[in-house]
Image: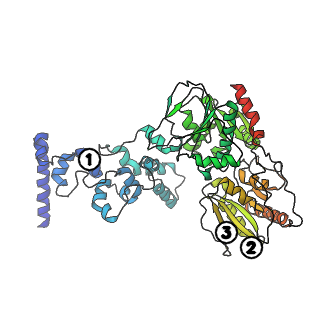
Amino acid sequence: MTNRVAVRSSLFSSKLSALVFLLGRKYRAKFLPEDFDPEIYLALHPDVDAANADAAEHYISQGVKEGRAYKLEGLPDDFDTTTYLELHSDVRMAKLGAAEHYLSHGIKEGRLYKRGQFPEELRVQNYLTPNSTEIAEQVDATGDGLNPKRIGEQTRTSVSAHKTRKISRAEKKTKITALLNSRFALATPLCTFAMRNSEGAARITMVTDSIARSSLLGGVGTALIFCAMLANRMGASLRIATRTEPPKSSDIEPFLTLCKMHVDHGVQFAFAPLSGESYELDIFENDLFVTTSWWSTAATLNAVDPSSILYLLQEDERMFYPFGDDRHRCDTIMSNREIHFIVNTELLFNHLVSTGLDNITARGAWFEPAFPNWIYKKKTGRNGSKRKLFFYARPDNPRNMFYLGIEVIDRAIQSGLLDLSVWDVYLVGKNIPALEFTNGYQPRHSEGLTWKDYAALIGTVDLGLSLMSTPHPSYPPLDLVASGAFVVTNRFLNKQDLTKYSPNVICADLDLQSLIDALSQAIALTESRTEDSPAEIENLLNTDWHKSFDNIITNLLASD
């Protein structure tokens, strides 16, 4: 009996469907809610859309009795269909409608519908490679990883719903410009407007992410020193434009005082946020711009004459990325033949030129950084306290080899090479996890130091371990030897020996045993020092920033 009823119901639905269709749109509308939207209905029900069914006909003949939703009632204003499917692979793989699933199941299951940790404009980043995790798992499970045809079929299947279905009015569209700006947010072009320079005075704009006190260590501080010296030589004012957080004069004043620097014609500040706020930077035709990374250079290059840009290059930034879009964009900026390059150390300059950046030979110059002896100096008088081992710990920066470094220290402790009755271990850096070595020892942490506090700390250090898996010597090893410590660091490409800076820098191959052996050598040298017979603080470091930059500035001004 039940089967007969089902058959009759099916026949009735089919006849009703055919009748409604034949009667036409005018009569069909009588059976539909006034706010029925066929595009929204198809977006809510991909199975209906995939069957090429007419939305209104399907709703009347089947949707009503199946209780199908026909509008977006109850959805949060910021609900995003694409994001919901990305967050919930079970919904995506079952090819269910995002909005329908959220309303019928997602709310009561407590499912997230947006990425709370990302601003809305960044959601598109994770949609670039849909279902990549599932594809990788399937390939690994079948052992068919060398079959590109199979991978292609899985990819087409997994994204077919996104590629073939119609985009409804309810869905959020992303313009190409917005997509690129969200994916490469730090390189978002500066918003500028041209002004006549009625006074004719020169101005320099330094474009960087942040000048917060903890950001001034190393590269940003070096850029600020260069800008101050250049501004004074040109009789120019200095403007600092930051992109990730608003600049404050109180952030740079202590730093400039520590470095015995000043800006004769004053410093202006501007916030040029990546998104979310409106701003415009006024631009004079004779302005110069100093940039501190490939992304700040890219942002500036889209707004000003390339010949007005001085790119202070302090690392082979191509090495920040695997081969892909980011590396390509970085390489494009570093290969530019119109901007000027000012490269931190001869060692890095030679590496860049030898790896194909011949533009830097024609448009670049190198300098050696300075380590003023009133900032970097050895503190005397141990008073019976333990010796200090400094480890430069930045787990979020792969080139600093954090995990290899802590493994070296752990092995040294386990073997008795590093006697903890004599030594304390200091981890200095950023975002350092709470650690406990194998024997239960817990190292001391120092994070977010100002340059002054950092200099005070390293003046008390006896031995440093600082790794940098790039050709640049980096600042911490040189900071430490300038302050009287021994340092172990690693070799990399043309960075094989750093005794030109100091014989107290010991370079080792970048492997566990070589670094342990170098640490053993450095510990022996350190422990040979006593209060009665301290070893000489040997280094050949430059101590004067004027010696670093005077010739470069002279040549730049002469070329103009």
Q: Which mark is residue 99?
A: none
Mark 3, secondary structure of its residue: loop
**414 over 494 or under it: above or below:** below
Mark closer to the chain start, 2 or 3: 2
**409 over 48 or under it: above or below:** below
Q: Which mark is residue 420?
A: 2
- For label 1, the residue is 40
Q: Nearer the viewer, mark 2 or mark 1?
A: 2
- Judge from the rendering whether residue 170 lies leftward or rightward of residue 236; answer left or right: left
Q: Decide: marks 1, 3 in contact (CB < 8 A)?
A: no
Type of amino acid at the residue the image marks with label 1:
Ile
Type of amino acid at the residue the image marks with label 2:
Leu
> Does residue 432 appear in the picture of this structure?
yes
Mark 2, Cα crowd under 10 Å, few <14 / some 14-19 / many 20+, is few
Where in the figure is residue 292, as x and y percent of width and height? 62, 41
Type of amino acid at the residue the image marks with label 3:
Pro
Mark 3, Cα crowd under 10 Å, few <14 / some 14-19 / many 20+, is some
In this view of the protein, which residue sits in the foreground, 483 or 143?
A: 483
Q: Decide: marks 2, 3 in contact (CB < 8 A)?
A: no
Mark 1, secondary structure of its residue: helix
Q: Residue at x 36, y 61 (%)?
A: 111
Q: Quadrant of the N terminus?
A: bottom left
Q: Quadrant of the C terminus?
A: top right
Mark closer to the chain start, 1 or 3: 1
- Judge from the rendering whether residue 176 lies leftward or rightward of residue 1; answer left or right: right
Mark 2, secondary structure of its residue: loop
Please, which colouring scheme is shown?
rainbow
- For label 3, the residue is 443
Mark closer to the chain start, 2 or 1: 1
In this view of the protein, which residue sits in the foreground, 61 or 533?
A: 533
